Image (cartoon, rainbow, N blue to C red):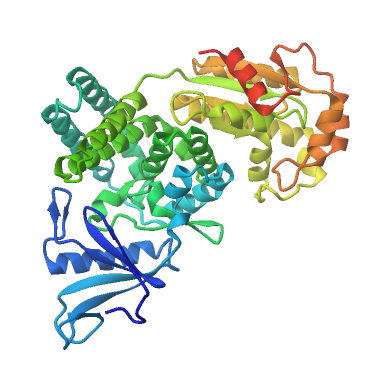
Amino acid sequence: MYKPAPATVECIETHASVVFLAGDFAYKVKQAVKYPFLDFSTLENRREALRNELRLNRRTAAQLYREVVPITEAPDGGFRFGGEGEPIEWALVMRRFDQDSLLDRLAGEGRLALEAMAPLAGAIARLHAGADRVLTEHHAVRPLAGIIAEHEQVLAENADVFPPEAAALLAERTRAAFDKLSPLLRARARSGYVRHCHGDLHLRNIVEIDGEPVLFDALEFDDSLATIDVLYDLAFLLMDLGKRGLGSHANAVLNAYLDAADAGNLVGLAALPLFLSLRAMIRAKVELLRARHSSAGNGADMREEVRAYFDLACAYLAPAQPRLIAVGGLSGSGKSTVARAFAAELLPFPGAVLVRSDAARKRLFGVAPEERLPDSAYTQSVSDLVYALCRKRAALALEAGWPVIMDAVHAKPEERAAVAALAAEHGAAFTGLWLDVPPEVMRARVAQRTGDVSDATPQVVDAQLAYDLGAMDFDTIDASDSVTDVAARCLDRIGP
């Protein structure tokens, strides 16, 4: 059947497919099953699903997806790929990759690098940027309304798994959030944020190849289920990271995605808690289905997974207070490192939006983050514009009810006053933090930077040391210790 014949064949089975790993290739066959959400019961349906899978996944993983071929009966009674005669089944031929490079395995083994999250977010942003757009409003709300109705039915019919009181509260909060957000969701559809996305974007469907993230196994059996708000697509990955206790990774993905995508997604953050909750409840339903049909004797463990996803779905819709934290300090004081260290600790999950003046300056001039700008990009008039752009970006997130950390020097009293006034304007709790370290530490830190968005040098630090800071109305934090200790001090000042 296989050419060339492999030494061994490994079989991976899911609820809808069987994949045979043979030599350098993988052969995917759809199972002849029918569920409420997919129908592979006919040969033609399975063929079309595989063809769609090939088409969709070539957007992000062309190096993996090769062709769809018939499986036919050989003269000796065996089977062959691509033979003559009437097809008895169809298979998708893919190039095989190292299963140990799947991101879910890396995460499970503690090998998923935090530094890999920015490239991953970039890959997702590129997929979304090139995806087909659907401008009709019903794609934004009608499918979600159907999902919510299904969730309500599952919650009501499985009181032995979902505590009735908690289930009723989840259903109530979900419906209330959906009703409140429907105008925003429709507006996002009209603005082009509903696109033919991946649709099944979790860690098991991402693999690292040659050091780069590759998205594969996009949802293929129903295009309408993958034609969704881009933030709903992203929410599956964020939820999966959170379920695994990787909150900092989820925060890094969110912020890198927001940096790579357009600013309209900052307003869309208002819908992210609902999206996360729906994604968690979908996983709860899948695990419940597996538990109900399991014959492996692990039903109790599966029920625990169902409850874990249910608990997440409830937690994501818990009310949270918008807040604005300004992290100031001279270059080399550790502002960006410390801000990233505690951003994931702020509610709601996956934590605060990071607004960094260095990144805003690079966007203003249209250059890559690591590209050095000339001195003319650091005049006072340019810096005033950069601070205004940062406050605008922060305002968009605050309007969505999201916590924001604004990372900028904030050396001038008027800059500190402006960010405090921004918080008051949006009814957000405000904390100003000034990171203080000895001059020699700041000089050493900036001298050691490579590939950083900041253009600061030891000479810049010396120039900043001559600033007249005025009366310091931010809370001063000793930032000369470890990042963990400094982040903890910041969180103590921020409070609950």
Along the viewing direction, whichever of 140 and 253 lies nearer the viewer: 253
Residue 395 located left or right of residue 401: right
Residue 122 located left or right of residue 203: right
The percent position of residue 51, horizontal first and vertical second, equals 27, 68
The percent position of residue 186, horizontal first and vertical second, equals 31, 38
Q: Is residue 299 above or below residue 22?
A: above
Along the viewing direction, whichever of 408 and 241 lies nearer the viewer: 241
The percent position of residue 24, horizontal first and vertical second, equals 41, 72
Quadrant (top left/top right/bottom left/bottom right) for the N terminus = bottom left
Q: Is residue 368 above or below residue 96?
A: above
Q: Is residue 149 above or below residue 101?
A: above
Residue 463 located left or right of residue 26: right
> How many tags in the picture?
0
Occupied quadrant, residue 115: top right
Q: Is residue 321 visible?
A: yes
Q: Is residue 141 visible?
A: no
Along the viewing direction, whichever of 460 and 382 lies nearer the viewer: 460
The percent position of residue 187, horizontal first and vertical second, equals 34, 38
Along the viewing direction, whichever of 333 and 387 lies nearer the viewer: 333
At horizontal 21% and vertical 56% (from top left) the residue drawn is: 16
At horizontal 26% and vertical 27% (from top left) the residue drawn is: 174
At horizontal 44% and vertical 64% (from top left) the residue drawn is: 97
